[in-house]
Amino acid sequence: MSASSLVAESVWRSIESTRSVTDEQLSILHFLFGKNFERATRIVDQRGVKRISGEPSERSIFQVVGESRRKEEYFCFAEHYCACYSFFYDIVNKGEQLCCKHQLAARLAAALGACIEVKVSDEQLAQLLVKI
């Protein structure tokens, strides 16, 4: 794991424990993620993050609204994967970013308790995951 990833993880854990963000934490996240972080905060501010949780397992996936006029929705696992083009192009292929704006939005919304919570059966969650 890179030094940047370790710093980011430390900041995320701190935000999750307090459910709030300090100016210093904002500065660190902005430094690490740049424009992607700015875009992610807009998505969170617009209530564009859903956490879809299966019952009874409590497994979950995030559904994050994109910023384009079409308002695409992308399924993602905040720390590992996003179905958007940028994830494959900038993160997987080029290795230029740590994560995409949708992953950041999911992580930030989860840390702040700002997700729209959607409960579905485990079977329904499995059907969503098959589409990925």
Image (cartoon, rainbow, N blue to C red):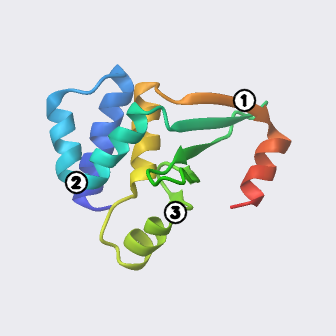
Q: Quadrant of residue 11?
A: top left
Measuring from the top left, give residue 114's x and y in whole percent. 46, 26
Residue 99 versus residue 45: which sits nearer the camera? Answer: 45
Residue assigned mark 1: 119
> Residue at 44% of width from left, 73% of height from top?
92
Q: Tag 3 or tag 2, which sits nearer the N-term? A: 2
Q: What residue is shown with label 2?
A: 34
The secondary element bearing badge 1 is classed as strand
Q: Position of residue 93 (x, y in %)?
A: 42, 79
Q: Earlier in the sequence, mark 1 or mark 3?
A: 3
Kindly state the secondary structure of the residue where label 2 is placed.
Answer: loop
Q: Quadrant of the N terminus?
A: bottom left
Q: Pointer 3: what residue?
A: 84
71 or 106: nearer the viewer: 71
Q: Residue at x 38, y 58 (%)?
A: 99
Task: Indicate the amino acid at tag 3.
Answer: Cys
Check disc 3: other Cα within 10 Å, few if <14, some if 14-19, many if 20+: some
